[in-house]
Amino acid sequence: MNGIEKDMDNLGRVVIPIKFRKKFGIEGNSTVLVSLEDNAILISPANKCCILCGKKVDGEQKFRLCQSCIAEIISDN
Ligand SMILES: [Zn+2]
């Protein structure tokens, strides 16, 4: 099973299960990126997301930019 049902409090806060946080290296007081997918709310470690568009950055990128933003920057010059 991939999903775990969690109760949200009246301010919209949800505790992310510890095993999920450990898997992605999300510690207390760290910044996460909350984004909308087609039918889901996605929470990603902020340091794994493109600083321009918020898309997940694949693998070991030197800069926090996704391939499409890199391509766009290069084509503008
Ligand atoms: Zn991007």
Image (cartoon, grey):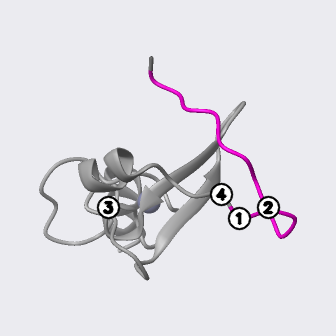
Residue for badge 3? 48
4 or 2: tag closer to the N-terminus: 2
Which of marks 3 and 2 precedes in the sequence?
2
Q: Which residue is mark 2?
A: 9
The answer to whether residue 10 is magenta is yes
The residue carrying mark 4 is: 14
Secondary structure, mark 2, is: loop
Give amino acid for label 2.
Answer: Asp
Determine which of the numbered discs, if any, sits on residue 62 in the image. none
Q: Residues within 10 Å of mark 3 (few under 14, many from 20)?
A: many
Quarter-of-image position of residue 63: bottom left
- Specify start and end residues of the magenta stretch as a single range: 2-13
Say what amino acid the circle numbered 1 marks. Answer: Arg
Q: Assign ligand 1 to one image quadrant.
A: bottom left
> Dot 1 corresponds to which residue?
13
Which quadrant of the rendered structure holds the C terminus? Answer: bottom left
Q: Position of residue 14 (x, y in %)?
A: 65, 57
Q: Secondary structure at mark 4?
A: loop
Q: Is residue 67 magenta?
A: no
Whether pointer 1 and pointer 2 mark residues with C-beta atoms closer than 8 Å, the reply is yes
Residue sitting at x 40%, y 78%: 30
On the rendered image, what quadrant is the N terminus found in? top left
Q: Are marks 4 and 2 in contact (CB under 8 Å)?
A: yes
Q: CA distance from mark 1 to mark 2?
A: 5 Å
Distance of mark 2 from mark 3, alpha carbons? 27 Å
Q: Are marks 1 and 4 in contact (CB under 8 Å)?
A: yes
Q: Is mark 4 within 8 Å of ligand 1?
A: no
